[in-house]
């Protein structure tokens, strides 16, 4: 299975200006090389057969005839290949010259797309040689074949559809790619010859990223390289592949040799994203019609895809490098703004939060502290309650107390042991039986305390549960599942850890920092089962429901991208290839995720309000609306045929 991926390539050949024979040999070599690597579509630069910098040589009959002969040669070489190639060349129709992209496959010219916008300013004077193809729609004869020349064409190869624009087209206020994608093109190929000047590359990268994001498409950009540099202009061989705003791969600038830049574009992801974007669908209604050209050939089936060249991020919720600090700052600010608005709206006198010494309650307390500060109120308005139970360890208890003290909040300690013992007696439960009743009664007792103290102090209960716990249903219904406002509701567990670390490094005193960093290093646990004989945590969440880094990976691709379980498994294999997770381990926890995600929807259907901070949210009032009684059988069956 291809799982919706199409392998593409941006090819930058070595070019001799005006030497069609030489240039064609370089193009041939790259086509054969790419086909051997499983590439389905390869794109070459603008006017790659002749060279872009030919200037008045484009008026020479020798060059035009040689170019057509070279195209004959490329058609011949592709007869036995499965790859689709897009090459640039000049085309004379009558007495008019066009700058065109030629699509060839299995020895046939599938179609030709003319350049729409002809630059004629600063260093560019293309109107001296070429005419705009905006209004051209004709059939012409080339290499003894009848070929349609038209800019409004979308090519369908079965596994994807693609459109073409040429260089300056992208820089126009409304690029042709905007129309082509609205009419179904999954990928845009841009044949370009962009010279290099200071800061232009950065702007170009932003332009490509933005256009691929706006059009929700793959975008393959190929620009002329070292051999085109002549007279006053320098070309550096930009080759870039984008997918919905994200750079998948790029070539090396100022490279003096040929380059083949490859990656896989996820067509299923793009189509799922478009389907969920109603604005995109509404925009397509007004888009002008295009001609869909089918490339249907049973011999051109893609090679089996077992390994991706693109990188699959094992932590899709966690940005890399310097972006992490910026993202943490922004998320924390969103949490604070949401809670501050709720407090101001209802004039809450206090914020009541349960503190366990774990990650989630720590983050919630930090948000409460910043919120109260932003409202110019005393931190004593935060009522932080630690509620030791049967499984509370000295480490978490001490961390909870230290953090509350260093933050200067109102501290209350209320043990739940006696209340739970009384409750067990009331319902006739054996305290030595550590089952779900034993565990959940503790969670509900804590929630009762928090709610009652909030009533007593005129405040609200600030929830601590995170997105990962909501996805797995790892919360006690009407226990820690419930609050008046859940500040962590759309933050996954893998990101909670980074947020707490970020606050520790940027926003607190030394005493708080020491405590926070120890909390970050503490094993995740609900602490509902007594500690071991050495006083250490015995009940570790990830031993019970699985590693959160796996579950967050599953969650992202299941909810954000709508992928089937088998594809998520395939992606996880790629993402965690260098980790200690075996295929069997990944498959086991993926089954657990799918089963729990479906069976625990009833907890999400009545979850409290909480601020949305990212692209994945499980709020029943927002991003995720699912019947509580849906069955997981169809999704679990998708995993049955997987052989780890």
Image (cartoon, helix red, strand yellow):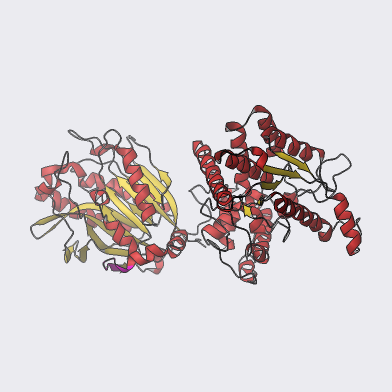
What residue appears at the point 21 percent right and 65 percent down from the top-left corner? 147
Q: Is residue 123 visible?
A: yes
Regarding residue 362, the answer to whether it shows in the image is no
Residue 603 sits in quarter: bottom right
Q: Where does the magenta region start and end?
A: 285-292
In the image, is 59 to the left or to the right of 328? left
Residue 243 vs 296, above or below: the answer is: above
Residue 179 is situated, as x and y percent measured from the top left of the image, at 29, 61
Q: Position of residue 335 (x, y in %)?
A: 56, 47
Q: Is residue 439 left or right of residue 205?
A: right
Q: Is residue 18 magenta?
A: no
Residue 623 horizontal/vertical position (percent): 53, 61
Query: Main SS of the magenta segment?
Result: loop
Residue 558 vs residue 469, the one in the foreground: 469
Between 244 and 35, the residue placed more toward the observer is 244
Residue drawn at 64 percent across, 45 percent down: 364
Residue sitting nearer the eye, 305 or 144: 305
């Amino acid at each position: 299975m291809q799982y919706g991926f199409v392998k593409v390539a941006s090819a930058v050949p070595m070019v001799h200006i005006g030497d069609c024979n030489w240039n064609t040999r370089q193009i041939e070599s790259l086509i054969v090389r790419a086909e051997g690597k499983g590439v389905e579509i390869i794109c070459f630069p603008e006017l790659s057969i002749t060279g872009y910098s030919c200037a008045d040589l484009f008026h020479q009959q020798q060059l035009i005839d040689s170019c057509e002969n070279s195209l004959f040669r490329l058609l011949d070489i592709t007869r036995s290949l499965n790859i689709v190639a897009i090459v640039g060349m000049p085309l004379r129709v009558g007495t008019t010259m066009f700058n065109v992209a030629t699509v060839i496959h299995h020895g046939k010219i599938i179609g030709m797309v003319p350049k729409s916008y002809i630059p004629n300013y600063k260093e560019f004077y293309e109107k001296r040689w070429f005419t705009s193809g905006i209004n051209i729609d004709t059939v012409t004869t080339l290499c003894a074949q009848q070929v349609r020349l038209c800019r409004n064409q979308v090519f369908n190869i079965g596994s994807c559809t693609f459109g073409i624009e040429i260089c300056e087209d992208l820089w126009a206020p409304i690029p042709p790619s905007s129309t082509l994608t609205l009419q179904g093109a999954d990928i845009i190929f841009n044949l370009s010859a962009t010279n290099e000047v200071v800061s232009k590359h950065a702007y170009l990268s932003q332009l490509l990223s933005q256009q691929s994001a706006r059009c929700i498409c793959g975008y393959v950009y190929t620009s002329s390289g070292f051999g085109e540099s002549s007279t006053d202009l320098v070309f550096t061989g930009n080759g870039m592949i984008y997918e919905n705003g994200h750079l998948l791969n790029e070539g090396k600038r100022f490279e003096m040799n040929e380059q083949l830049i490859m990656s896989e574009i996820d067509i299923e992801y793009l189509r799922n994203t478009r389907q969920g974007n109603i604005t995109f669908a509404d925009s397509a209604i007004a888009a002008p019609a295009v001609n869909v050209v089918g490339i249907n050939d049973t011999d051109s089936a893609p090679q089996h895809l077992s390994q991706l060249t693109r990188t699959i991020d094992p932590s899709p919720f966690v940005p890399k490098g310097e972006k992490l600090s910026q993202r943490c700052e922004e998320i924390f600010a969103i949490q604070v703004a949401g809670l501050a608005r709720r407090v101001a709206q209802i004039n809450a006198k206090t914020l009541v939060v349960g503190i366990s010494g774990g990650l989630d309650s720590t983050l919630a307390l930090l948000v409460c502290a910043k919120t109260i500060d932003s409202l110019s109120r005393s931190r004593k308005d935060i009522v932080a309650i630690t509620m030791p139970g049967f499984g509370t360890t000295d480490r978490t208890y001490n961390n909870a107390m230290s953090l509350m003290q260093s933050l200067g909040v109102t501290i209350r300690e209320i043990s739940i042991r006696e209340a739970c013992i009384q409750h067990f007696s009331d319902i006739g439960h054996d305290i030595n039986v550590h089952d779900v009743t034993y565990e959940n009664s503790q969670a509900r007792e804590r929630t009762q305390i928090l709610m009652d103290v909030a009533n007593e102090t005129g405040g609200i209960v600030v929830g601590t549960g995170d997105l990962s716990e909501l996805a797995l249903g790892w919360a006690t219904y009407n226990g820690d599942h419930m609050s008046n406002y859940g500040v962590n509701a759309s933050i996954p567990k893998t990101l909670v850890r980074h947020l707490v670390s970020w606050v520790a490094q940027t926003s607190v005193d030394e005493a708080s920092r020491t405590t926070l960093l120890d909390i970050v290093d503490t094993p995740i646990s609900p602490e509902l089962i007594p500690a071991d004989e050495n006083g250490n945590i015995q009940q570790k969440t990830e031993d019970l429901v699985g590693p959160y880094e796996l579950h967050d990976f599953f969650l992202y691709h299941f909810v954000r991208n709508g992928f089937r379980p088998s594809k998520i498994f395939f992606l996880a294999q790629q993402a965690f290839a260098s980790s200690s997770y075996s295929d069997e381990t990944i498959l086991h926890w993926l089954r657990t995720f799918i089963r729990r995600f479906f069976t625990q929807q009833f907890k999400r259907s009545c979850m409290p309000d909480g601020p949305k901070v990212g692209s994945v949210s499980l709020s029943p009032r927002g991003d995720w609306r699912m019947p509580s009684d849906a069955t997981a059988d169809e999704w679990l069956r998708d995993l049955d045929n997987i052989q780890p």
